[in-house]
Amino acid sequence: MPRSLKTGDGKDFVSAICKQAADEAFLSVDGFNGDGIADTKHHGGPDRAVCMYSDEHYALWEKQFSCTLSPSTFGENLTVGGMLEDEVCIGDIYQVGNAVIQVTQGRVPCNTISQRTGLPGLMKEMIKTGLTGYLCRVVKEGIVHSNSIITLLQRDPNNVSILYANEVYFQRPKDQDGLKRILAVDALADEWKDMLIKRLEKLQTTKKERTTR
């Protein structure tokens, strides 16, 4: 739940990034029961009910930044193995425990990660590498256990990986073909869909203006 925290230089901030481990929890369309949100503008909602992050990245960041990261450092609901950003696609449907979830977008890292870890370079590296984790909607509610097996039920036919989407989103904002490819995914989160449509329309309008001059 949201609580008052302190940055490395002693400044106060309120966040629910510090998750507590649980042997089991009920996953509803709004997220895990008992999981709170401080910044409801940028977090939560049906398209962002579950945040997932790969366990493999912890060793990478600990080595790069010479640090020890606590469990759920990135505020993820599920720390998972074998589900990297270049393998997981937007629209993929997974069963986890008794619940069924669908990947909707890559995660957009926020400054709360820097505030919690005291490592401002970490968020920048997450964005640079595309190792951001990803968000999901809940297709079927159910109980999830800490040792639940995650099974791929359906691969989205567009094969737009989280890593690819992140590269277009962060590194190639003017890539019209890339934007169109992401927008072709029906399961894409509404927020990303609206934002990418606006970005694409702006690029197309600018191109037309240059052509008519």
Image (cartoon, grey):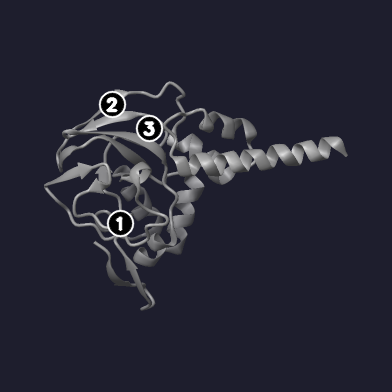
Binning the other alpha carbons within 10 Å of mark 2 as few (below 14), some (14 to 19) or many (20 upward) gives some
- In the picture of the structure, the residue carrying the numbered disc 2 is 152
Which mark is in front, 1 or 2? 2
Q: Is residue 94 above or below residue 122?
A: above
Nearer-N-terminus badge (3/1): 1
- In the picture of the structure, the residue carrying the numbered disc 3 is 88
- Residue at figure coordinates x 43%, y 21% from the top left: 157
View extreme (bottom): residue: 10
> Which mark identifies residue 73?
1
Distance between mark 3 and mark 1 Cα atoms: 21 Å
> Which mark identifies residue 98?
none
Q: Secondary structure at mark 2?
A: strand
Q: Amino acid at mark 2?
A: Leu
User: Where is residue 65 shown, x and y percent of the image?
Assistant: 39, 58
View extreme (top): residue: 157
Discs 1, 2 touching: Cβ within 8 Å: no
